[in-house]
Amino acid sequence: MADLYDYPDIYDERFTNRANQAYKKHYQKMFAGKEIHTLLDCSFGTGNLTFPLAELGYQVSGSDISAGMLQKAGEKAAAKGFSIELVPCDFREVSAHFNRQFDCVMSTGNALAHVDNEGVIKAVHEMDSCLKPGGYFYFDSRNWEMAQKNRQRFIIPQPFYQEDGTRIGNVQVWDYHDDGTIIINILHSYERDGKIFKTNEFQEHLHPFPLALVKDELERMGYSQFEIKPCPWFDDKPFSEIGWYCLMAKKPS
């Protein structure tokens, strides 16, 4: 079955202007009072979760393992009038592709779960190498501890609507495997005038990891001032009840 990330146009259908505004507010809260001017998102994708920062005036750079996603991001950046350096590379090797350090290094969009635990730790150290002393490490993730506890199989997110009124539905079936991995089977449907006229099927192959895997490693590296907050659309509840979270921490000077 096809991988969703091989289809950047379809991937983009899930991100609306309302989501863009929600992420702007989220970043304004998370970045308030911090000396951040330059940032690198090493899971840039098509830019949906990082363009809000460019719109807020930050100097943004990006990398991603998918050249197709970055090509789409470049087209969108040009249309928005942004000058953004975009480099295709694996976040487990990102430090070899940038000859400077940033005030903030990010991994957005639940990207760390696309590699195993060893790969996550490798990515954390690579991101750290790109980060200035005293800078800020940021990542977001599904709450995999909550997901594995609940083991919900069938998920139907809210539909999206195109300008012409087309309703885009999304049905997910989660397969939990004995090795701890999860495959999310996704059915996209396109509906107009009460009739489905097109469908697409995709999969996401994911490696769940606990928050402590990253947090404990950052603590060993001397990071401090940890903030763990819900991402947009998720209420500020105890961690065990937050479906999608972000972590931000300060690198030692």
Image (tube, grey):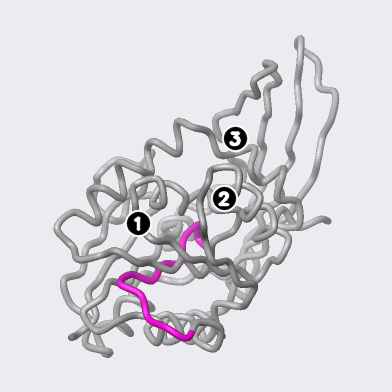
Q: For numbered disc 1, what is the local secondary structure? A: loop
Marks 3 & 2, CB-CB < 8 Å contact: no
Mark 2 belongs to which amino acid? Ala
Residue 100 vs 163, above or below: the answer is below
Q: Where, quadrant-wise, is the C terminus in this rendering? A: bottom left
- Reply above or below: 142 against 198: below
Closer to the eye: label 3 or 1: 1
Residue at mark 1: 58
Q: Residue at x 76, y 57 (%)?
A: 6
What is the distance, in whole Å, between disc 3 and disc 1 at their CAs? 35 Å
Q: Is residue 27 magenta?
A: no
Instruction: Determine the secondary structure under disc 3.
Output: loop
| Cα distance between the residues tagged 1 and 2 | 14 Å
Query: Which residue: 50% across, 70% down?
Result: 42
Could you classify mark 1 by the number of other residues whose Cα lies within 10 Å: few (under 14), some (14-19), or many (20 or more)?
some
Of labels 1 and 2, earlier in sequence is 1
Q: Secondary structure at mark 2?
A: helix
Going by the image, does 2 lie left or right of 48? right
Alpha-carbon distance for marks 3 and 2? 31 Å
Can you identify the residue that label 3 sits on?
A: 156
The image's mark for residue 77 is: 2
Q: Is residue 211 left or right of residue 147?
A: left
